[in-house]
Amino acid sequence: TYIVTDNCIKCKYMDCIEVCPVDCFYEGENMLVIHPDECIDCGVCEPECPADAIKPDTEPGLDKWLQINTEYASKWPNITSKKEPPEDAKAFDGVDGKFEKYFS
Ligand code: SF4
Ligand code: F3S
């Protein structure tokens, strides 16, 4: 499966939604997650993310994010069409500590 990681927080560009063939993105206030059981591993969303936030869960060190995607995909609503990204998305690209401060 692919999962959404830290740098999506407060960037939330949502280009990923438009390319996913199975609509498996779920929306929190400041980020999206992927439902790991619905993702068909096609990989098309990974290069579409301007924040480079989408990764295959086979990359080392992503256990925490696999758990977060799994948990919140069942709590947050499904999102199938792109909305306007936050106006200050660029300012948050690459900022450290976003999970601690802004995860929602
Ligand atoms: Fe959707 Fe494919 Fe990305 Fe999985 S890898 S979230 S199926 S676009
Ligand atoms: Fe987030 Fe990238 Fe999608 S910033 S909303 S994973 S395009």
Image (cartoon, rainbow, N blue to C red):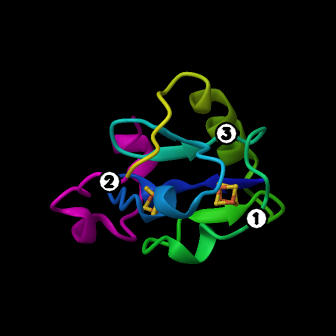
Labels 1 and 2: the sequence-earlier one: 2
- Residue range highlighted in magenta: 82-104
Labels 3 and 1: the sequence-earlier one: 3
The three-letter amino acid code for the residue at tag 2 is Lys
Seen as rendered, the residue at the extreme left is 87
In this view, the mark in front (3 or 2): 3
The three-letter amino acid code for the residue at tag 3 is His
Does the magenta-highlighted stretch encompass residue 15?
no
Nearest the eye: 35 or 23: 23
| Residue 73 x, y percent position in the rendering | 60, 32
Write down the quadrant of residue 88 in the picture: bottom left
Left or right placement of residue 41 versus residue 46 in this view: right
The answer to whether the beta carbon of the residue marked 1 is less than 8 Å from any atom of ligand 1 is: yes
| Residue 11 x, y percent position in the rendering | 34, 60
Would you name the residue on which mark 1 appears?
Answer: 42
User: Which label belongs to residue 35?
Assistant: 3
Would you say the magenta stretch is mainly helix, strand or loop?
loop
Residue at position x 60%, y 66% in the image? 45
The three-letter amino acid code for the residue at tag 1 is Cys
Secondary structure of residue under mark 2: loop
Q: CA distance from mark 3 to mark 2?
A: 20 Å
Nearest the eye: 73 or 92: 73
Residue at position x 33%, y 36% in the image? 29
Q: CA distance from mark 3 to mark 1?
A: 14 Å
Seen as rendered, the residue at the extreme front is 21
Ligand 1, seen in the image, is in the quarter at: bottom right
Does the magenta-highlighted stretch encompass residue 88?
yes
* Placement of 36 over or under 92, stated as above or below: above
Would you name the residue on which mark 2 appears?
Answer: 10
